[in-house]
Image (cartoon, grey):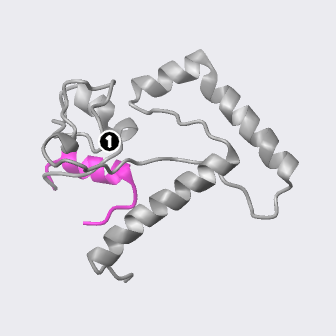
């Protein structure tokens, strides 16, 4: 069932309207820790340091990995100097101990990258999920 974000999906899960969802760790971890939700597994390649007692799907389905990630983009014609400055500032922010601790508490794992590394990462992830879409013959509605 499609939802317009994690909040309505979690609301329906907590209210018993649906029995299971795939949610991001930052959106659901507070409910898991409070005992309002039971996590069945994490979809990252390995267990999460934030919830070490929760199995990774890959433990019973070898090779499975379905992580969510977030990135910062800019319009294609943004000057290189501006992109480099933004990248430098974002990497510096991600290195801040307070921010690192907060993200870790939410179960988020920062992946600071250069522009080239991020482009390569996005291309690889696009290819990975493109294979899934083609293999499952998924079509846009």
Query: Is residue 136 positioned above or below 13 on the image?
Result: below
| For residue 109, above or below residue 129 | above
Name the residue located 53 percent from the left edge and 37 percent from the top edge.
111
Q: Where does the image place residue 66, in percent across and percent down from the top left?
A: 33, 51
Q: Which residues are magenta?
A: 1-17
Q: Secondary structure at mark 1?
A: loop
Residue 7 appears left or right of 122: left
| In front of the other: 43 or 113 | 113
Task: Give the crowd class for mark 1: few <14, some 14-19, many >=20 residues within 10 Å.
Answer: some
Quadrant where the C terminus is found in the figure = bottom left
Q: Residue at x 48, y 28 (%)?
A: 103
65 w.r.t. 138: above or below = above
* Image quadrant assignment for residue 112: top right
Residue ranking furthest to the top: 97
Residue 2 counted in the magenta span: yes
Residue 127: give x, y in percent of width and height: 45, 65
- The residue where tag 1 is placed is 44
Q: Is residue 95 magenta?
A: no
Q: Position of residue 83 (x, y in %)?
A: 78, 48
Residue 18: x %, y % from top left? 16, 55
Q: Is 82 displayed left or right of 37 in the figure?
A: right
Q: Quadrant of residue 97?
A: top right
In this rendered view, identify the residue nearer to me: 141 or 11: 141
Quarter of the figure with residue 122:
bottom right
The quadrant in which the N terminus is found is bottom left
């Amino acid at each position: 069932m499609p939802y317009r974000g994690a909040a309505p999906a979690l609301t329906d899960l907590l209210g018993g309207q649906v029995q299971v969802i795939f949610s991001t760790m930052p959106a659901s971890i507070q409910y898991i820790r409070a005992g309002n939700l039971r996590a069945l597994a994490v979809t990252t390649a390995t267990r999460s340091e934030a919830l070490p007692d929760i199995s990774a799907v890959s433990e019973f389905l070898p090779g499975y990995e379905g992580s969510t990630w977030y990135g910062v983009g800019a319009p294609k014609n943004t000057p290189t100097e501006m992109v480099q400055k933004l990248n430098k500032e974002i990497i510096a922010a991600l290195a801040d101990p307070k921010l690192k601790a907060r993200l870790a508490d939410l179960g988020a794992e920062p992946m600071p990258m250069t522009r080239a590394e991020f482009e390569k990462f996005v291309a690889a992830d696009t290819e990975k999920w493109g294979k899934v879409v083609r293999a499952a013959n998924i079509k846009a509605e």
